[in-house]
Image (cartoon, helix red, strand yellow):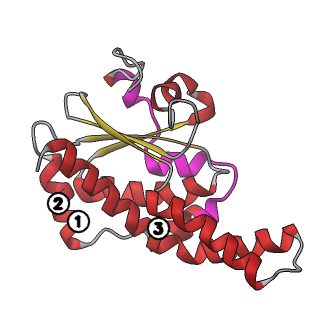
Amino acid sequence: MAQQTSVVTPERFATGFTYKDYIAQIKVNIDRFEDNLKTAHVSPDDTAFFRKVSKLPNGPAKMLVLGEDWCPDVYRGMPVLHRIAEAGGMEMRIFPRDQHLDIMNEFLKEGQFLSIPTAVFYTKDHRYILHWIERPASVNREMPEIREAVKREMPNADEQTIRTVDGQRSVARYPAWQQETVREIREALVQKLGL
């Protein structure tokens, strides 16, 4: 966190949307959120892990998520964050990023980017544990590889066609990327909690 005193008090955390209420008020991509919720799975082993750590005194009992409904990383990532919260029995609250830039400013990617989704984990008594931003590191490596493969396979294609095919291939990878999100968050918690 960039600053010592957070703008996210327990009282403010409680004002965030639940997942159900967030979905009920979004304006775009409802179908994409629904489709990605269907593919978002937390294995029995991961469920047991998240349940166990959420009960620890220094474990994640709360998850704050910043997002916007128009963002592909959000409509892919937020459903799996919801599944993690469900699996662990964590209280999840969602804040639209653009209406809560003061919160976002505490969790900028590389200290400068308003990247979403951002998931912030807190203990039951609202002590900050860690935050996770946007997408797994492996996905950041894979995305340009997919685009370059499309360009090699379609050397004469225009930019719009390349974007379309690249997008289709990326969407096909979403379930695997969701699983990588679960793995990366679990690993981050193991490290942070010294398990």
Work out whether 13 lies above or below 78: above
Query: Quadrant where the N terminus lies?
Result: top left
Per the rendering, the mark at residue 87 is: none
Of circles 3 and 2, the one toward us is: 3
Query: Is 110 colored magenta in this rendering?
Result: no
- Majority secondary structure in the magenta region: helix
Distance CA(mark 2)–CA(mark 1): 5 Å
Give whichever of discs 1 and 3 has the lower sequence position.
1
| Residue placed under numbered mark 1 in the picture | 46
Residue 20 or 187: which is nearer the viewer?
187
| Residue placed under numbered mark 3 in the picture | 177
On the image, the x and y values in percent for residue 65 come to 44, 42
Distance CA(mark 1)–CA(mark 3): 15 Å
| Residue drawn at (63%, 49%) of the image | 69
Query: Is 15 colored magenta in this rendering?
Result: yes
| Residue drawn at (45%, 57%) of the image | 137
Labels 2 and 1 touching (C-beta < 8 A): yes
**Image quadrant assignment for residue 148:** bottom right
Mark 1 Cα shell of 10 Å, populated few (<14), some (14-19), many (≥20)? some
**Image quadrant assignment for residue 150:** bottom right
Left or right of 71? Residue 82 is left
For label 1, the SS is helix
**Boundaries of the magenta span:** 11-32
Left or right of 156? Residue 183 is left
Distance CA(mark 3)–CA(mark 2): 19 Å
| Residue placed under numbered mark 2 in the picture | 49
Give whichever of discs 3 and 2 has the lower sequence position.
2
For label 3, the SS is helix
Q: Which amino acid, by three-letter code, is at mark 2?
A: Phe
Mark 3 Cα shell of 10 Å, populated few (<14), some (14-19), many (≥20)? many
For label 2, the SS is helix
